[in-house]
Amino acid sequence: MRKEQPIGVFDSGLGGVSVLREIVSLLPAEDFIYFGDAANAPYGEKTEREIRALTTAQIDRMAAAGVKAVVLACNTATSAACAPLRRRYRQIPIIGMEPALKPAILSREKPRVIVMATHATLKQKKFARLMERFKDAGEIVKLPCPEIVEFVERGETHSDALLRYLRKRFADVLQTPADCVVLGCTHFPFVRDAIQEVVGQAVQIFDGAAGTAHELKRRLQEVDALRADGGRGAIEWLSSSSDPRYIERAKMLYAL
């Protein structure tokens, strides 16, 4: 592993751009390859086997391109593929996502926490273990919101249609007041303001991007692989989409 090698950041689409922003903010000297598998999105409605196969195929390409670490900037891909990828690439740090349930639960006494995610993430054993770990520390409510992925993929982050969708999804779960909302999909931070508008300013919102960025930094420090030349790194934007405007949408979201 050489310090000048790039870091691979992978997502099923544009959601991972929210994680990339956090990582670049923390590690500005690094070079990155961002890949969004838009041609196969959304992952959240696929089977675990399909998700694992799609994710592995793209990480194989990143490894062949010479990345020094990989970030699975997708909760669904992390749940389905992170463990087997770590066994496959023992020499490359593979960093996954985890819904920020722990900080939400620990933020106050016995909170009521709503976890927004895709169906696939909420059904995975990884999330079930996380819920089991904290089940006695507060009330945890699962709220599948897969359509948000499609809003973000269209570049729609605060439209009337999005607000109507969010109000409909939250209508039942907010019959009892909530303390926290956990954004369990990397697409969701792009609609954070819209979610806050619907749930109210008193509700605290958590996402896992910052934790992932710090874990990446820690893992690279362990093997002395962080760049320290003081320069500014570059981002190579890649996608499986045939739409020439897709990369422009990714860059637009990155700049938000």
Image (tube, helix red, strand yellow):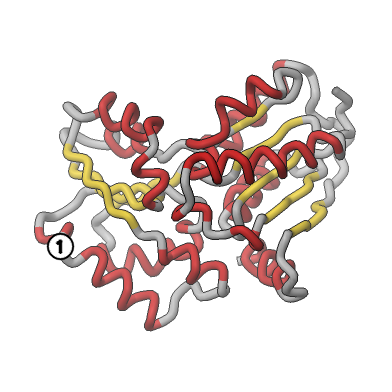
Locate residue 148: give its quadrant. bottom left
Residue 9 appears in the figure: yes
Residue 210 appears in the figure: no
Helix, strand or loop for disc 1 = loop
Residue 149 vertical placement versus 3 (above, below): below
Residue at the disc numbered 1: 172
In-front residue for pair 207/230: 207
Rate crowding at label 1 as few (under 14), some (14 to 19) or many (20 or more) other CA atoms within 10 Å: few
Q: Residue at x 19, y 52 (%)?
A: 178
Q: Residue at x 73, y 51 (%)?
A: 34
Q: Residue at x 80, y 24 (%)?
A: 225
Residue 221 vertical placement versus 19 (above, below): above
Q: Amino acid at mark 1?
A: Asp
Q: Position of residue 152 (x, y in %)?
A: 52, 68
Q: Residue furthest left?
A: 176
Locate residue 87: give its quadrant. top right
Q: Position of residue 138 (x, y in %)?
A: 18, 34
